[in-house]
Image (cartoon, rainbow, N blue to C red):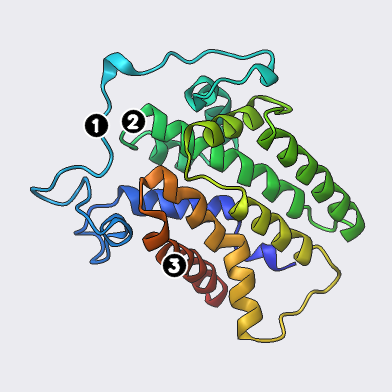
Amino acid sequence: MLMLFLRPSSVLLIWVIQLLQVPLVSSFCLRRAVNQRPCVWCPQRPPLLATPNPSSQSTMTTTTNPEAATTDPVEYLGSMETLMAEYDPILLFASRLLPSTTVRAQAGALYAWCRRLDEICDQVGADPVDTQRALKNWQERFDALTSGHPVDELDAALTACFASMPGLTVEPFEDMMAGMRDDAVPARRVANMAELEHYAYQVAGTVGLMLLPLLQAPIQQAREPAICLGQAIQLVNILR
């Protein structure tokens, strides 16, 4: 399966590192490119994301009824960070450098959804029929959470993101799941470069689209650069 190249949750980790890095590390500052305005780490420039106000940060609570989801993903930050600590502790460390608790929670909600989708597709030796069945169930869970009926706290965190981030749409999530379904077949082969680029969009470019509202980027101007960065990450990893 092609998904062995790079997990979507790993792509999200690379995006977070790119979000955090200073321009001296790389001549390409993504946030300046996609926003066409100064970023928080560029010298003598105003911040892209507002500096958090400690007095306004929410206290983490545990929600026993996920259908009583709030519109604040911070309510579920504890569950998301538990998942990160288990599977991707480097991402957990990097996420704590993000500029506010809200941004951490939003990134965590996207990570939790991608991470659990990864687990469906990365079962070594799994029967493609079983994987397709699991993906169908995951699609139904996604439909439920976008309708305001999340199954658990991690789903509720993404429901809260959809409620609180107007620029977040179902498109990249649907496209990523379509890519997973296309990949869950015996001995898949890619016919040409166009098909490979489309696959790279489905499993990595979509992560860029998910993160644009979090970056507070102008969606239409930033859409193509976001997709291209995700595709590039995937293609470079394949070449490695």
Gap in Å between the C-alphas at discs 2 and 1?
A: 7 Å
Q: Earlier in the sequence, mark 3 or mark 1?
A: 1
Q: Please say if 158 is above or below 226.
A: above
Measured as percent of width and height from the top left, residue 96 is found at: 38, 33
| Label 3 to label 2: alpha-carbon separation | 26 Å
Give, as a three-letter code, the residue at label 3.
Answer: Glu
- Looking at the image, residue 192 sits to the left or right of residue 208; the answer is right
Query: Counting residues from the N terminus, which is met first, the one under dot 3 or under dot 2?
Result: 2
Which quadrant of the figure has residue 1? bottom right
Q: Residues within 10 Å of mark 1 (few under 14, many from 20)?
A: few
Residue kind at label 1, given as amino acid type: Thr
Look at 59% across and 55% down and name the residue there: 172
| Position in image of residue 28 (x %, y %) | 27, 65
Badge 3: few (under 14), some or many (20 or more) residues near its Cα, within 10 Å? some
Relative depth, front residue between 206 and 24: 206
Helix, strand or loop at mark 2: loop
Residue 140 horizontal/vertical position (percent): 79, 41
Please say if the residues under marks 2 and 1 sit with CB atoms less than 8 Å apart.
yes
Q: Which residue is mark 1?
A: 51
Q: Label 2 amino acid?
A: Ser
Q: Secondary structure at mark 1?
A: loop
Left or right: residue 67 versus residue 6 is right
Query: Which residue in the protein does label 3 denote?
Result: 224
Distance between mark 3 and mark 1 Cα atoms: 28 Å
Identify the element where label 3 is drawn: helix
Q: Residue at x 46, y 49 (%)?
A: 211
The one of 15 and 146 positioned closer to us in this rendering: 146
Single out the residue that lies furthest toward the left.
44
Residue under pointer 2: 100
Mark 3 vs mark 2: in front: 3
Vertical order, 40 against 33 (above or below): above
